Structure formats: C-alpha cells, structure tokens
Image (cartoon, rainbow, N blue to C red):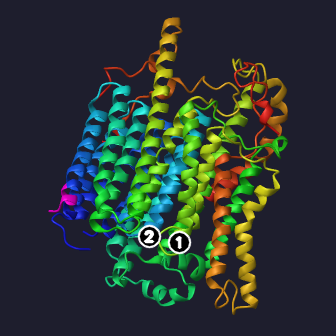
Amino acid sequence: MSVADAFTAIFVLLGAFFFIAGWVGLVRFPDTLSRLHALSKADNLGLGLVVVGLLPQASWPFGALKLVALWLVAVLVGGATAQMLAGAIQARAGEAGDRVAAAAGTDAAPAVDDGPGAPR
Amino acid sequence: MTEAQIYGICGAGLVGIGLYGAILGRSALRRLLAFNLVGSGVFLIFGAIARRGGLAGGAASDPVPQALVITGLVVAFAATALAAALLIRLAAVERDEASARGKPEAAGAPSAPVAAPAKSTDPRTEQPATGQSGAGHS
Amino acid sequence: MPDFPLPVPLWADIPLALALLVLALWLTATRRDRAAVIGFTGYGLLAAIAWVRLGSVDVALTEAALGGGLMGLLLLTAAARLGERADQPRPAMPVRLLVGVLCLGVTLALAAVVLSLPAPAPNLVAAVAANQAATELGNPVAAVLIAFRAVDTMLESVVLALAVIVLWSFGADRAWGARPRTLDLGPPSPALMLLGRLLPPLGLIVGVHLFWTGADHPGGPFQGGAVLAAMAALLWLARLGEPPPVSDGLTRVGIVIGPLLFLLIGLAGAVIADAFLAYPEGLTKPLILLIEAAKTLSVAVALALLVAGPPELPAPAPARGETAAEPGGTV
Amino acid sequence: MSSLLLIAGLVILLTVLLGLVRILRGPGDTERLMAAQLLGTGGVAALLLLGSAIDLTGATDLALLLALLAAFAAVTFVAGLGAGPAGAPDGRRGSAPDVRGEGDSPASQ
C-alpha cells in the first residue's frame, strides 16, 4: 500500500466516521439546535475529509480541481443553510415564548419548541 | 437479482403508491406529489429496461429510452409547475371571496373591500377552464 | 465492472429502492402538506442516485437538477403560499380498500412485466453507435436527443414555451404586464443574501459546463438550463433581483429562441439536406452547437419563469409599514 | 484500495438512508429538512466514493450538481417561513405555528 493510498484510507474512514456521528446526533440528540450542530459536523467535516482523502486518487488537475470546488460549494451552502435554519429555529422559539408570556393560549401549545420531550 | 430488476420492481411499486395517492390524496398538493410519484415510477421502469438493453448491447444503458426519460422529466416538471400555480391562484381567489363576504378576518379588513370585487369576478369565469387544463395535464 | 468482495446490488440498490418506496408511502400517508413536500425533495435526491446505479448519468443529472433542486423550490414555495389547509374528507373505508386493491393490482402487473422481459433484451445501442459518427457527438444520449429523435426534442421545447404562456394566463387580468411575484416570500435573511451573491456565479459555471460537456460526456442543454434556472430563482428568492415583467420583450425572445431556431434549421434541412430536421453534411456539428446553445438559454428562461409563477400585482397597501420599502422597485 | 472506498461509500449511503427516520418521524419540519440535507451531503460523499471505486462515469459531475442544489429545499423552506399565504399582505401569521407538527409515523412503519 503506497503512502497516497494510506492517506486516502485514513481520511475516508475519518469522513465516514463523521457521517455516522452526524447521523447518531441527528437521531439521538434531544433538541433541534443540537441536531443542527450534528448535521453541520457531517456536512462540513464528513464531506470535507472524504474529499481530502480522495484527492490523491483524482486525476490531476481537473479531477482534483472539481473535488475542491465541490467541497467549497458544500461548505458555503451547508454553512449558509445551517445559519438560516438556526435563525428560523430561534425566531420560532422567541415567538413561542412571547405567545406563552402573553397567555394568548389558543395555538401556543403546538408552537412551543420541541424540547427534551421529543418523541424518539 | 440485478439492479435493473430491483429498480424495475421499485418503479412498479411507486406507480401503485402514486396512483393511490393521486386518487385518494388528502389535499390537492399531495395529489400533485402523487402524480409525480407515478411519473417517477414509470421513468424508473423505463430506466430498468434501458439498463437491460444497454448491458445486452455493450453499453451502460440504452441511449434511446434515456433520451425519452429526459424529455419526460422536463415535461413533468412543467406540468407540476402549472398545477402548483393553479393551486396558489385558486387559494388566493377563495381567500378574496371569503373576505369579500365580510368574514371577520383580521388581516383582510383594511384592504379587501377595495381589491376584492374586481379580483373575484374575472377568476371565477376562468375557473372551469383552468380546472380542465389541470386535469388534462395529470 | 470487476468483481468485488461484497455484492453492490444487495448493499446499495435494495436499501435505496426500499428507501424510495418507504418515502413514497410516507408522503402519501402523512398528514401535513409541507412535511410531505420536504420528504419529496429527499426523494428527488435518492432518485438521482438510483439513476446513476442504472447507468444513466444523463438522466441522473436531469433528475438532480429538476427533482432535487427546482422541484423542491417550486413545491415548498407553493406549500408556503397555500399554508396548511383543512384536509378534505376521506372516502369511506370500502372505497379506500377498493382503490388500494386496484393499485396493488397495477403494481403486481407491472412487476410481473418487469420480471418477464425477454431474455436477450432488445436494444438500440448498436444502431445508435453505428450512426453516431455522423453527428460528431461523443455522447450517445445527446445524439439521440438532437439528431435521431429531434422531433421529440423540438416539440418538447415548444411544450416548455407553451407552458410559460399558459402559466402567465393564470394571472388576474388586471395584473397582465406585471412581474411574477410567487417567489417574493418576504425579506431575506442575511445568510440567504450571502448565498444569493456567492452561489449563482458558481452555478453559472456549472450550468455552462454541463451544456458544453454534454456533447461528449453526460450533460446537455436540459441539465445546464435547469441549473441556470435554479440560480436565477435563488437570486429572486434572495431579492437580489426581480423576475422580468411579463410584458418584457427580451424575455419573450429568450423563451422562443430555442424552439424557433431548432424549427428554422430543421426547415432549412428539408431544402438543403434531404429531410426535415436533417443536418447538411459538414455543417452538422456547428449547427447542433448553435441549436443546443439556444435551447439551453430557452430552457433556462422557461424553467425559471415557470418557478416564478404568474404575473401578480404588488400586495395591496401594506398598511403595517413593514414592506413599505418595496414599491420603488415595481413597475 | 477500491474495495475500501466502496465499503466506505456503502456505509455512508446506508447511514444517511437510516437518517430517513428523521424525515419520517420529524417531529418538526426543521428536523425533516435536516435529514433531507444529510441525505444530500451523504449522497454526494457516497457518489464520490463509489465513483472512484467502481469508475462510475459522471459521478463527480452529479455530486457537484447535488452539492450545488441540495440546499435549495432548506433555503426555500426558511424563506417560506416568513411568508404568509398567497394574497395576504402581512406574512408571519398563520405559518409560524405549524413549523412543528406531529409526525405520523405509524402510517409508514
């Protein structure tokens, strides 16, 4: 096994590990923001490590260039959407809090963030 | 089991599920999704046949069914876009009519009396025709 | 394909097919529209991978661009616009059972057909390969689309143009000539604006690359056009631009230029070459490129306008002052 | 080498397919969306790995396309949260409360 192959093996396995970790987090973490955190790990680290690992195997230069471009796109898109989702979650939590505080009562209950009691 | 058989059977299942959803879907949007499922299932069966033909002919997949599926995908998308626009339009018309009837709605009160009469007459006349075109697409 | 220690069909194809079926079942059974639509976007991604496994990368690219990207945008916009609506009353149990049994029958019949296809599978691979050299295209699918079944492809781009016309006619009479506003979903978040600034240039490169590479590798006008349309929709969603008014002449030219050029060259072929839609010897490749470029443009414009919706007047009198900054940009 | 890439790709694919549980069970649409996004990212990684393991032509192009477009659902979803139903000038109301919504998993499992 050459050095390049060993490099690939290590990074690809690490990437796969982060995907599994992201999945476990998404399924097992109790609240939405933590799940988002787990997802971002898989998004950035998982895919990033896989791409780094595949670089030595890619054709030079265009294959490698494509891989790097792909990872940049993934980081940009993943980061921006995570930010947007987190903002939406926070806005919703704030709204729900306001409504509970105002004791409007009608649809406050379904709007409360799915906290620790989320079904599993 | 080859992948052609697996996805062919999967496509058959999708057609059945989609048909059920298209007939008994809970809402119009859901029936639209189901219509897309039927299309997707048919395309997958096509893909399975293309795969078998391709392997028999020494390629990954037969190019002729592939080209047909590409054409079909684009047309299915256009039909879906039309149906979705119709649904949105219909909902807006219904909402206008509801507020024109003076339903005590918080948001509709300030603006509705001005806009509603003009808006609700013309769409009502075109409603049957649009309904037909929607049916023709699905 | 060489042998591998573990059978790919068992480990990749069966789970993938099962996931597609489970997702389909779930999204017909679930209660809420928007949840179902989100499930459907996941379905589009999975379907694209399934197409790769079937050896049809061209179709996979189309499915990813349309089913994964634009379809999600279209349907989620529709879901947001419609809001959650009351379920329609469900028919009685016997009716549902009857429909279920009939649909199961359709599935079983189709599955039986799939399993009993003739053993030496009939195919047109050899026929396409034999004549492909005449088109000077390396991608057999592109050759079929643009040359061997050119009538299909031309009519299909006509269908796209017609679809835009029909869509525009859904607007209220008073709104004719205004801009489409379906994608105007309220003030965008900063992250969306960042994405709207950085992603479209990349998407432009990818879209043009897909069109250009389509001659010899998987890709082509539909895939490239769909990517370009998705980028335009992202711009409109982030409010970095607005869809052109329905009355805009340049937009209309953009919609019809693809089919029109295709038709004109096809008609010229009836005179110069020997048949309608035949290409004269020697000029084949340049003409095909010209048609494909125009078609990419038309597909992009038409798909983007299909997502943007019918013309709409600006929301009447905001009254609350939150969206009051807007009227400056309207026609 | 390629069998290791193949195994890694299959593991990632199976992992994200198991993430479908979150699409099915929710509980909120945000979770469903995250699962769909994991599906997209994992699909990209699996495509890259399988593509370099068994030489799938065009797998990298498809992966690039998926990476570019997989987030459109999330983007539209969040943008749609701020929008009201058609015709209602004031967004916000009506759509915010139903971000969460009970998943109805019994129907599917």
Q: Chain of mark 1?
A: B
Residue C277: quarter of image: bottom right
Secondary structure type for disc 2:
helix
Quadrant containing the C terminus of chain B in the rendered view: bottom right
Q: Residues under labels 1 and 2: Cα distance?
A: 9 Å
Picture coordinates of residue C255, whole percent (x, y): 73, 61
- Which is nearer the eye, B45 or B27? B45
Q: Are marks 1 and 2 on the same chain?
A: yes
- Decide if residue C306 is on the left or right side of residue B31: right
Residue at image location 56% in from the left, 59% down from the top: C207
Instruction: Give the number of the disc on residue C140.
Output: none
Please tell me how crowded label 2 is: few (under 14), some (14-19), or many (20+) other residues with Cα within 10 Å: many
Residue at image location 83% in from the left, 44% down from the top: C173
User: Which residue is under mark 1?
Assistant: B68
Residue at image location 69% in from the left, 93% down from the top: C274
**Res. C92 in view:** no
Work out whether C322 lies above or below B118. above
Quadrant containing the N terminus of chain B in the rendered view: bottom left
- Decide if residue D68 is on the left or right side of residue C83: left
Q: Which residues, given as a range, are shown in magenta?
A: A1-6
Secondary structure type for disc 1:
helix
Indicate the amino acid at tag 2.
Phe
User: Which residue is under mark 2?
Assistant: B46
- Please tell me whether the stretch drawn in magenta is mainly helix, strand or loop: helix
- Which is nearer the eye, C95 or A120? A120
Picture coordinates of residue A94, whole percent (x, y): 49, 16
- Which is nearer the eye, D24 or C67? C67
CB atoms of marks 1 and 2 within 8 Å: yes
Picture coordinates of residue D19, whole percent (x, y): 31, 42
